[in-house]
Image (tube, helix red, strand yellow):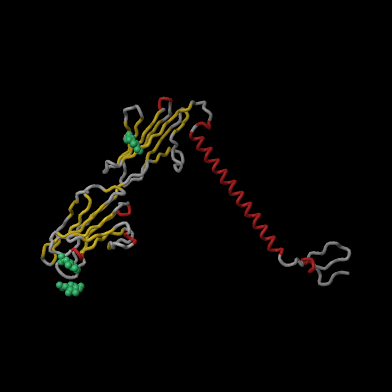
Amino acid sequence: MKVLLVAAVVALIHGIAATLLIKGPSEPVLEGEHVTLECLYSDSELNISQVHFEVFSQYMQRWRTIWSGSWCFASMSTERTADSLVLFIPHAAVNNDGSYRCVSDGENGTAADMISPLLDFKVHYMRELSLTREGYRSYLGVPQELKVRLGDDVVLECDASSSEEPDFSWSRDGDDWILPSSTLTLRKISAMDEGHYTCMAEHPSVEALRRNRTISITVLSKDARWYESSNARFMLMTSAAAFSLLMLTFVVSASLFLFCRARRAAAFKGPIDDHYQKKPIYKTSVESLPSICADKQPLV
Ligand SMILES: *[C@@H]1O[C@H](CO)[C@@H](O)[C@H](O)[C@H]1NC(C)=O
Ligand SMILES: *[C@@H]1O[C@H](CO)[C@@H](O)[C@H](O)[C@H]1NC(C)=O
Ligand SMILES: *[C@@H]1O[C@H](CO)[C@@H](O)[C@H](O)[C@H]1NC(C)=O
């Protein structure tokens, strides 16, 4: 159980010094951890039953009372003990971030309208690292094994979604240099640049939050066939995907077209087609004239 840190400010109401306190975790909270907040009076004479928690809603730009049992606060529960009100958050999540306070809503007595100091609550996290190569589309990421042609430039960018901007560094297996940057730049790559490179990300305020990702770089000879490089493979993959999509679109539209035509043909078959009966028939002609250019009386 974490030591609770007391944040307190003296409130003077009706000339009587009394303080409403809020306690929260003393250490940074990680995603998924169990957290408790607590409201209590410095003066135990005051009745805690009229105290409740409030959280500032960024969305509504106002303070909202935390109701235990309301679906808005389904991830929390409150419990009243003899001299405190406790808020439980069993699995801290990013949406629990915010400013919390304790408010006394007693309408009578000296505790009326007392408000505790604010407690700013932040949940820390760091997601998996993502790598992108400069000049290449980022949505597929970089392969675990990057094959590049001799003399190419390789610029790799390491990134992570995190509650605070991480400290990044790059290193190479077997070497003792560390590049304190999120960007690894290898210009005019040569066989000497081959190896396993690791990007490391460390959370600036939570030591436990750190991630790493390793990528192997292989240098192909200058006369390597063009499709052997990761770049070409990527292009082939993309083209294959685009082609499949095109074919799929074609097949679907063709089927739709045929289906609609069949439907229309079926619909028109309904009543007996009296098309020919509206037109005059010529004795000498096998065909009738089109009705639009027909006279009222047939020419006999
Ligand atoms: C606090 O107030 C509630 C009713 O509002 C009452 O039932 C309870 O006995 C009071 N507790 C103390 C310690 O005065
Ligand atoms: C406190 O307020 C309630 C109503 O909110 C009232 O019934 C009660 O008599 C009040 N008590 C005192 C001591 O003023
Ligand atoms: C890299 O991360 C893995 C877990 O994903 C961990 O086991 C390993 O020790 C880390 N390596 C370094 C050098 O921190």
Which residue occupies the foreground of this view, 182 or 8?
Answer: 8
Image-quadrant location for residue 17: bottom left
Residue 111 in sight in this render: no
- Left or right of 122, for residue 43: left
Which residue occupies the foreground of this view, 289 or 108?
Answer: 108
Name which residue lies at 21% across and 48% down: 2
Image-quadrant location for residue 198: top left
Image-quadrant location for residue 62: bottom left
Name which residue lies at 43% across and 25% down: 191
Q: Position of residue 253 (x, y in %)?
A: 61, 52
Query: With respect to residue 51, does 123 lie above or below?
Result: above
Q: Position of residue 16 (x, y in %)?
A: 11, 64
Q: Position of residue 118 (x, y in %)?
A: 22, 57
Give the farthest residue toward the front: 82
Which residue occupies the foreground of this view, 110 or 182?
Answer: 110
Query: With respect to residue 160, does 265 lie above or below?
Result: below
Query: With respect to residue 164, does 287 lie above or below?
Result: below
In which quadrant is the C terminus drawn?
A: bottom right
- Left or right of 193, for residue 34: left
Which residue occupies the foreground of this view, 78 or 277?
Answer: 78
